[in-house]
Amino acid sequence: MSDHSYAVNLAQRLIQCPSVTPAEGGALELLQAECEAMGFSCTRLPFGEGAARIDNLYAEIDASDGSGLPHFAFAGHTDVVPVGNEADWSSGPFAGEIKAGQLYGRGAADMKGGIACFIAAVKAHLEAGKPHGRISLIITGDEEGDALNGTVKMVEWMQAHNIIPDMCLVGEPTNPEQLGDVIKNGRRGSVSGHLTVTGMQGHVAYPHLANNPMPALLDMLAPVNSTELDGGTPHFDPSTAEIVSIETPNMAGNVIPQTVHAQFNIRFNTEHSADSLTGWLEEHFARIAAARNVEVSVDWRSNAAPFVTEPGVLTDLLQSAISEVTQKTAQLSTSGGTSDARFLCALGPVAEFGLVGQTMHKVDEHVAVADIDQLTAIYGYLLGNLGGKS
Ligand SMILES: [Zn+2]
């Protein structure tokens, strides 16, 4: 069908499944068929109701030879972000075309390419006839959306069924420039606050007859106004806070508004928890509200706790696999946004390593065909050395 490897061909076929969240798009169906052909037992795990319903896939093979080798899990998502303006793409976003050594399409980098690599690595590992350990695949269709009915529920299901991998590797595109740059061994947490401050409306010329909520709001926002909350830790950058919106439903220049809203977000390291941050800020807000005689309410949304996998067996194994294949020394990093690793860390050590992420979520998303084959080799080396280097 083509002179490309199985991994590249599978990545193309996955891209051809239009699986924009929440659509399954045939992507899980395709993976299930590939896994079953390799002898995996597959369980589809749909969660949620109606339009929020999301399909997920857990696949497992017990390839252990009785040597007590570990249970190794690969994790990833088949859903992709929308393509934007399709006319801006140089080839169809779901065509999976290869041009000048690059595979184009939505999800090529984030992260159908990564999934194809680990499926291909497992296939080669099993075909080599030296099966090692228990291998599972945790594949969700809900990473790019609200992530309410994906990995978080799969992890609960796994815990309820006592399926606890010894380590887990997420194939997200972690490399900024070249394959082998960066392993993510943790992520900062995220908490958002939506603040509403209510004073008393009135004429700007008669401020003594009104109570402007703005000064109170500005005092309340001071500790989260483009600031660092700590000095960082050995594994993490400082926690940062940013105001993202301030709104008041007031079009008139001569009216002191009644109400003002603001939203802010904090990305925090392991020096804090969502509870410690919300507790600290609620106290601060209440103090200002009392002093300025306004009412305050705040809605919190925390969608991620910070986590870190201390350098150890998993990161060492990954680093040696990467240097074996790319001759590069991958750096450990906890930077960037959140990922499903925030849920998987409840099962055990988790790290992330995948393709180059430069074009993820962009028009003309693409990855190098050569990188797909190299990443497959890295994952293959990993599987071959789970029981210690041979
Ligand atoms: Zn992703």
Image: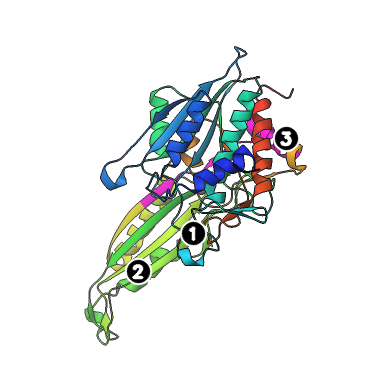
Disc with the residue nearer the chain's start (2 vs 1): 2
For the C terminus, the image quarter is top right
Amino acid type shown at disc 1: Ala
* Residue at the disc numbered 1: 241
- Please provide the residue range marked out in magenta: 301-323
| SS category of the residue bearing label 3 | helix
Residue 177: image location, x then y, percent: 67, 54
Residue 232 vs 388, above or below: the answer is below
Quarter of the figure with residue 350: top right
For the N terminus, the image quarter is top right
CA distance separating discs 1 and 3:
36 Å
Disc with the residue nearer the chain's start (3 vs 2): 2
Amino acid type shown at disc 2: Ala
Amino acid type shown at disc 3: Ser
CA distance separating discs 3 and 2:
55 Å
Residue 41: image location, x then y, percent: 46, 24
Question: Image check: 265 left or right of 356?
Answer: left
| SS category of the residue bearing label 2 | helix
Residue 122 at least partly seen: yes
- Residue at 74% over, 39% down: 325
* Residue at the disc numbered 2: 216
Cβ atoms under marks 1 and 3 closer than 8 Å: no
Local packing at callout 1 (Cα closer than 10 Å; few below 14, some 14-19, many 20+) is many
Local packing at callout 3 (Cα closer than 10 Å; few below 14, some 14-19, many 20+) is many
Disc with the residue nearer the chain's start (1 vs 3): 1
Q: Nearer the viewer, residue 235 or 21?
A: 21
Quarter of the figure with residue 117: top right
Q: Nearer the viewer, mark 1 or mark 3?
A: 3
321 drawn magenta: yes
* Residue at the disc numbered 3: 320
Local packing at callout 2 (Cα closer than 10 Å; few below 14, some 14-19, many 20+) is many
